[in-house]
Amino acid sequence: MNTMASDALDLDLGLGWRNSFAALGEDFYTRLSPQSLPSPYWVGRSNSLADTLDLDAAWLDSPALLEALSGNLKLAGSAPLASVYSGHQFGSWAGQLGDGRAILLGETRKGLELQLKGAGLTPYSRMGDGRAVLRSSIREFLCSEAMHALGIPTTRALCVTGSDAPIRREQMETAAVVTRVAPSFIRFGHFEHFSYNGQHAQLRQLADYVIDSFYPECRDTDRFAGNPYAALLEAVSERTAEMVAQWQAVGFCHGVMNTDNMSILGLTIDYGPFQFLDAFDPGHICNHSDTQGRYAYNRQPNIAYWNLFCLGQALLPLIEDQELALAALASYKTVFPTALQTRMSAKLGLVGTREADKVLIENLLKLLAADRVDYSIFWRRLSHMAQGAHADTVRDLFLDRPAFDAWMLQYSERTHHDVKGPESDLMLKVNPKFVLRNHLGEQAIRQAKLKDFSGVHHLLALLETPYDEHPGFEAYADFPPDWASSIEISCSS
């Protein structure tokens, strides 16, 4: 059997491919086709993303599209390729990496790139097999769409297709492919690759492409003596700061913030060993492979800055002034704390900004950590309390009731100054009822392994509207079962 996607049968979806990244030239990638996946089947599909792509919903039931998004049929107008990049992994220089199991199909007229993750070997697969397994593919699909619904910048996922083809990880598993969508999949590591290899012409070409395509305002700035590359570094720093502030506010742990997993557009990218916090533990490590705790929840803000510093070093041949680069990075240290406090204040329903608000928030987080209070449930119950629910529904979450009562007094005094008290309607719009907890994903995966995809479909429906109440689905917003703490998520997928 031919293991490559057939070029003889092209499927035309009317997406109007533009393929601007491919126009950069072959210093940036290797052209190749996906490898076919035997007897694929649908696992999950996002109708909302299909709408965004102007893809007729009927296509999502099409056997032809199933074949195409499993790597078995070429999409007319696409220009499949795997890009090369390098990066720092767990704080150490890893050298050349690249798309080891992801193949970029191209860019549509909507300015969105489609990428197949798990589509087979590429020149950058190193010791890997170029495949993704069902469990990790379901997690990435669900979390991509969940983060989008939470308003957090992210790559998205159109669908997951599965196959009974065996894949060996710690044990034998089955294969799957995620169709990922983003304006661009360019990472900090793309810049590091050309900079570390002394390919400064390609570095400039890449930076110019990113500026012209996504940051045109950097061309017309008076900042940094009109240096567009310093302006780019500042803009990326600010987007990254805003994104990480949103992570921290919602209790999201990425798990593997290597520089090659950082988007140049400030998008959450590469959902591997992620987790939404259950019990609030600032030092929580969600990645079983992270033995040193480098990517613990409370370290994410500083790691993001460390990664940006690496990006700044990579851009130095273009910025040509170390002080200018440091000045561009400085915006992170002002944008992040401001963005985080703004989001935490919104979670508390605070009107305006007061000097004591920072202390109020810090004291609350200390209480949550001391009693390991369930993070999502606390915020949702507090939101309902602001609408008139009994305070005991929140108080009962704490072991140290007197300490919580003292904090509640501070909170009541703060909100007493506001005309209507805390903005409870706002609180319900920023404190989700449903997040993709590990045990929920695990339950859907266990069903999917038995070819029952109803768990994936139900979860997707809840996660697409996470602030709604969804009567009858309360169990999905309840405390995690005891066995949830034994789930181990690692870089293996």
Image: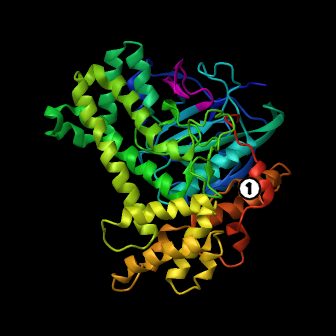
Q: Is residue 91 magenta?
A: yes
Residue 103 at x, y percent in the picture: 58, 31
**Image vertical order of residue 157 relative to residue 23, above or below:** below
Query: Which color mode does the image show?
Result: rainbow
The answer to whether residue 51 shows anywhere in this view is no
- Residue 155 horizontal/vertical position (percent): 51, 46
Q: Residue at x 67, y 68 (%)?
A: 477
- The residue depicted at 42 percent of the width and 73 percent of the height is 349
Sort mark 1 into few (<14), some (14-19) or many (20+) by Cα contacts within 10 Å: some
Q: Residue at x 65, y 60 (%)?
A: 460
User: 66 or 390, which lies in front?
Assistant: 390
**Location of residue 437 with respect to 162 vertically, above or below:** below
Foreground pick, 311 / 334: 334
Tell me, yes or no, if residue 175 can be seen here.
yes
For mark 1, what is the residue? 439
Return the residue found at the far front: 402
Compared to 279, does 88 lie above or below?
above
Position of residue 66 relative to residue 477, above or below, is: above
> Would you say 337 lies left or right of 85 here?
left
Is the N terminus in the top left, top right, bottom left or bottom right quadrant? top right
Q: Quadrant of residue 202?
A: top left
Q: Nearer the viewer, residue 256 or 156?
A: 256
Would you say 459 lies left or right of 32 here?
A: right
> Residue at coordinates 56% horizontally, 51% vertically from top-left?
282
**Disc 1 residue type?**
His
Q: Which residues are magenta?
A: 84-102
Give coordinates of residue 21: x percent, y percent.
42, 31
Q: In which quadrant of the rendered view does residue 319 lie?
A: top left
Is 279 within the magenta?
Answer: no
Helix, strand or loop at label 1? It is helix
Q: Position of residue 239 (x, y in %)?
A: 37, 46
